[in-house]
Amino acid sequence: MIRSLFRSDRRVVSLVSAFFIAVVFADLFARFYIDKLWFEAAGYSAVFWKQLIWQWGARVFTGISAALFIYANLKIASKSLGKFRIRRQMGDLVFSEEVSTGYVNRIGLIVAAFFGLWFGLVVSSRLGLQFLFTLNGASWGEADPIFERDLSFYVVSLPFFETLVGLVAGIVAVSLLIVIIIYVLSGVIGISNKLQWTPSNLGTKGRPRKHLAVLVCSLLTILAGMIWLSRYGLLTNGNSAVQNIFGYTDYYARLPVLNLLTGLTLSLAISTLAVGFKRLAIRVPMVIFAFTVLGLGAGQMYPSFVQRFRVEPNELSLEGSFIEENMRFTRMGFGLSELERKEFEYKRPEEGVDWLEAMEQFNGLPVWNAQALLTTYRELEARFPYYDFFGATIDRYPTDEGVVPVALSVREILPSGIQDRNWQNVHIRTEYIQGNGIVASYASNRTSEGRPPMLISGIPPDVTSNAETPSKLLVDNPTVFVGSNPQNYAVVNEKFSEDRKTIRSQFNSRGIPINSLTRTIASAWYFQDTNLLFSDDLDTASELLFKRDALDRVRSIAGSILHFPEQPYPVVHEGAIVWVLDGFTMSSDYPLSKLTEFPGTRGMRYVRNSVKVTVDAETGEVVFYVVDANDPLLDLYRKSFPGMFLELTSMPSELQAHLRYSTSMLDLQANVLNQYHQETASLFHGQQDVWTLPQELSQNSSTVPYRSEYGIYTLPGESEEAFLLTTAFVPRGRQNLTAILVAHNDPQDYGRLVLFEIPVEDQVPGPRQVEALIEQDPVISQQFSLWRTGGSQVWTGHIHLVPVGETLVYMEPVFLAAEEDAIPELRRFVVSDGYRVSMEPTLAGAIGGLETDIFEMTAESLSDIGDIKELGEVTRDWPAEALDLLEQAERAAQNLDFAAFGESLRQLRDLLQNLSVEGGL
């Protein structure tokens, strides 16, 4: 009876175990199968299989190797157990059974399998890819000056060797621990009072002693290898007092100490073998004490002694060459080797400012920030609660009058906004699973109501028709299945469509066809949704579309090799919406370079924005383009995944025209330049010319770091305007401007970096100082107070600075909102030359408020003109004529008539030039 119950319990346990194992394998299969289908639909099946094979191949190989090694050691150690018996009592009867060798071997096999599985699962998934990269590694053409090894060794090979050696050390250590436990339990190992290991207490035949000696020797040899590899790690983890770079003490003290410790560890490994095979006695405490003293003495005391008594009194002379190498490699690591450095010969505004040129410079600057745009778009253009806008971007589009800055945002689905969240609405109905077009507005102007002048608005998107509307903004296909925000999975099918455009989009879908029972069951398991099994809306023509966030989609394909810290931005291309993302190659193992913070990482020493990725908003098609063919790390990835990356020449030229220099990259390079603009070791050692980002006011009136911004303007010394990304620097602890960093975005000059440095003797007001000047102006301050007293919110936007001739001018928009979350209105423009400020309802008016050379000329200055009758076409009433032309320009700007605005400015410039030629100005 008892035996039958016992057998019944065993059956139940077996069935339950089998069920859970089946569930686990079913889950693994469903995930594998659906991911495989998704990669096939996305066109990257080869990438999927290669990553899977190398990642899981490394795990399987590691697990099997660990299990075999541990089992072999258990097999050897188990021989010391001899034969032992198990006693069991049933009632008054006592049974004694001898445990068979096979039973012991099975236990050993289970233990080895457990640890093999554990090592296979805990090993880094990157180990396989690291091995792949090591096999495909090629010379970078640059060697470090210390060990004279190619840089690819540090970035590619060394991380693999370190991971591999650490893994092997772990396997050997676990094996040694298990073997020691077995020998202790079997009584083979005995420890005397003096802790002296002798042949008598480690077995008469010496087999356990030799076994332990081999394991300990192996572990010590691996430890010696780890110490040896750590020598190279000094180049990325220096200990110099100068910014923690690799320095004099590292080279002349720590490096020799690591060599010594490597030799000592190898000597100890050999001594262990001698103990095991020559039956020599060794006093354990003495060995441990001696090794500890040598390790601490050599590893800690000697480098500290050198640093304190040799380096500190002579730091600059001894660290100078190391500082120079750190500066060189840091600039190489962050793409600053080709940086153009120019001196900006600043002149104070009283020496003359060309305000007409300033007006032209300001016309290409965006006055609307993302927060104000999003609030406006959401209130005016969302239209339905299930639509939303998740980001606004600044781009440029050509018109008949030239290139203009345009703000764009995509109308996407907001799943939480669906009122009736039943399964069909959330996953099937067309109007709830796809976004609907974009909204676009001029970024550098406003309407008479203080709102963005719309170029594209409404549902379906309607394009404003006038001469100034960019023709490339016309949207023929507004379908958005893939957006910038996480979405639910969707099932697309022709029969769900209500219009022909949607039907067209669904046939272009990159979804997974649900055309078999296996796919249907796997999809239901994958999404944990049984509705996929029983819905009558699904048939063989249905497609499953998921990973509908462009960023998630791209990371799923290339996240193991590329970094994507930024949200995608939309581009209108050939009447459809395309998302563009920036892909970065990076490494924290680049030698002699400064570890620098980078979004989404713990710091990097090498970063390149070498890849641009496009994602079709309708089909989800993903394409990777190479924008930096000189990046050796990207070249490695291209060899490892052939066919994954396309040349930039394969990208349509109209799409290339919308590529932008990454703000993350420029901010990173600006962070590096805060210290590494210093060109000599003595300057860097003293850190007397350190820069930082300026401060500017945020919407809540708190100060935030100055934000890099895109804009269209002309750089000093250049004749053509360009689409530029700009940031600024001030000295640490001060707020006067010291430099401007500019990145080119246009295809012909993409990636070109120019640093305009202001001489130390020139005191140029920085952004925060100009904002303080604005706050202190009595007229502006009084107006702000009046608005706030009336219950309105008042805040300033991003403060732009642009060069005009040989001076710098600032422009800042002023926003007004009736209450919190209300639609912001752009009510004023503030213009400053750094010493004076002017605020007016229009940009032209604000500029006119500072233009005193025309409107405040004295009688004495007029008398210097000479005989006015001799000025040709210039009449005696030229000041009134100039004022009339400026007012015409203001009216044209308010009416968004940019052709008339430009014509008025041209006439005014001609008038002033004629005066200048005739001697009037």
Image (cartoon, rainbow, N blue to C red):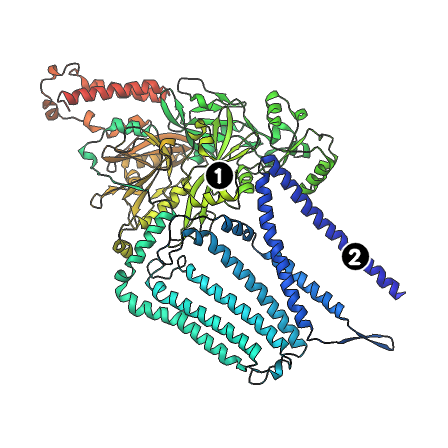
Q: In this view, does 626 lie to the left or right of 5?
A: left
Q: In the drawing, does residue 920 fall left or right of residue 828?
A: left
Could you tell me which residue is drawn at 65 percent across and 75 percent down? 183
* Amino acid marked by disc 2: Ser
Mark 1–mark 2 CB contact (< 8 Å) = no
Q: Which of 49 and 618 is in front in this view?
A: 49
Q: How crowded is mark 1: few (under 14 residues within 10 Å), some or many (20 or more)?
A: some
Residue 873 image-quadrant placement: top left
Q: Which of 431 and 334 is in front in this view?
A: 334
Residue 172 placement: quadrant = bottom right
Which residue bears the numbered disc 2? 14
Please say if 252 is above or below 361. Answer: below
Is 8 positioned to the left or the right of 513 in the image?
right
Residue 818 visible from this viewpoint: no
Q: Give me the residue at 45% from left, 68% from top.
A: 262
In the rendered image, residue 535, in percent from the top left (x then y), is placed at: 73, 33
- N-term-proximal mark, 1 vs 2: 2
Work out whether residue 423 or residue 396 is closer to the camera in this orientation and state it.
Answer: 396
| Vertical order, 839 against 129 (above or below) | above
Crowdedness of circle 2 by 10 Å Cα count: few (<14), some, many (20+)? Answer: few
* Image quarter hosting the N terminus: bottom right
**Where does the C terminus fall, quadrant-wise?**
top left
Residue type at mark 1: give it: Gln
x, y (%) of residue 190? Answer: 62, 81
Evaluate whether residue 806 shows in this view.
yes
Residue at the location (70% across, 40% down)? 522
Q: Which of marks 1 and 2 is in front?
A: 2
* Residue on which disc 1 sits: 567
In the rendered image, residue 892, in percent from the top left (x then y), is placed at: 33, 19
Residue at far front of view: 278
